[in-house]
Amino acid sequence: MPANLIKRDGITALAAGAAGLDQPEGNPRLKQVVNRLLIDLMVAIDELDISMDEFWTGVAYLTQAGKQDEFGLIVPGVVLEHFLDLRLDEAERRAGLAGGTARTIEGPLYIAGAPLLKGETRLDDGTDNGEVLFMEGQVRDVAGNPIAGAVVDVWHANSMGNYSHFDPTQAAYNLRRRIETDEEGRYRFRSIMPSGYACPPGSQSEKLLQAMGRHGNRPAHVHFFVTAPGYRKLTTQINIPGDKYLHDDFAFGTRDELIPHVERVTDAREIQKAGLNKPFARIRFDFALTKQVAGAPTTVVAREHAEAA
Ligand code: BEZ
Ligand code: FE
């Protein structure tokens, strides 16, 4: 078929009718968004001459992705979650907010309700023989003052790149904790070094990425939500340097400010002091939170989160 078969006026009229613009009832914002998306989609179909087969292949793909609960993977994979971060960064810049730790994507693998502990804790249950990792730091305001009572909600994959809850071989909340900072704003945890996540083999996400000549791998990383009363919620991650995918994350989550130095501790006395009998890794990373200000767009996202049973 040739391209550009339908006049723009015709497309606009079809979208307006389908979005209920001529109806007094309904949600005006929803109508506005559906109308715009329909126009853009019909224009794309007409301009690119998307065939019936291509269209229905797309519908079948999305249907299967929904059945397999994969939209949370596909959205970051096609850069949209990172794009939302870039919009929020720019909105904050325009609202005069600066100096906070860089944000990056949440991803789809957070589980709410992890155990809450004060000051320091251990995240792993001892069943993973990966490299021991100690991570510690301070939560501060942008002027450098420590924030006591902040909550560092941390989660990461095991040494196979798998997350508890989604990986039935791991105990509930393994490698997931909430840590309340001490009087000096400090948090500290012991865990094991994560490996990078990969889209499940044969998944809808992997199929799409492969069809575009891409891979579905992430570099090793650790996720955080950092919250404190009166401050803006921070959603971020740190990436482990040296990972093959450090600057080739399929989910576009790497940011240069979020790649801390990893110290490899081999000194026998330090190893003994840590209660270990083999070398370990140590990361020091401080978080800076910006103050809550009227008029700035919220960083608290209404997103569905599972809770462990
Ligand atoms: C993750 O954080 O592991 C992740 C992020 C986006 C898509 C898939 C996984
Ligand atoms: Fe992750």
Image: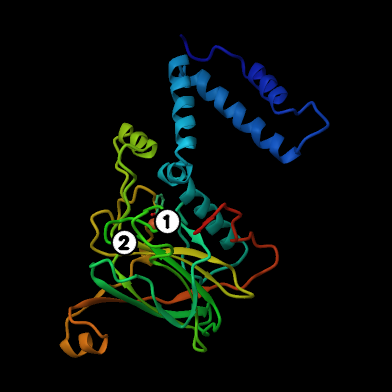
Query: Is residue 281 depicted above or below 184 in this figure?
Result: above
The image position of residue 64, as x and y in percent, is: 45, 32
Callout 2: SS? loop
Query: Is residue 29 depicted above or below 148 in this figure?
Result: above
Q: Is residue 60 left or right of residue 35?
A: left
The image position of residue 203, as x and y in percent, is: 36, 38
Residue underneath mark 1: 165
Q: Is residue 131 left or right of residue 12?
A: left
Callout 1: SS? loop
Q: Nearer the viewer, mark 1 or mark 2?
A: 1
Q: Which mark is residue 216?
A: none
The image position of residue 175, as x and y in percent, is: 38, 66
Q: Amino acid at mark 1?
A: His
Q: Amino acid at mark 2?
A: Asn
Residue found 35% across the figure and 47% down from its top: 250
Q: Are marks 1 and 2 in contact (CB under 8 Å)?
A: no
Report how far apart the C-alphas of labels 1 and 2 lie in the structure: 12 Å
Q: Which mark is residue 158?
A: 2
Out of 172 and 175, give the one closest to the viewer: 172
Out of 265 and 49, give the one closest to the viewer: 265
Out of 183 and 159, give the one closest to the viewer: 159
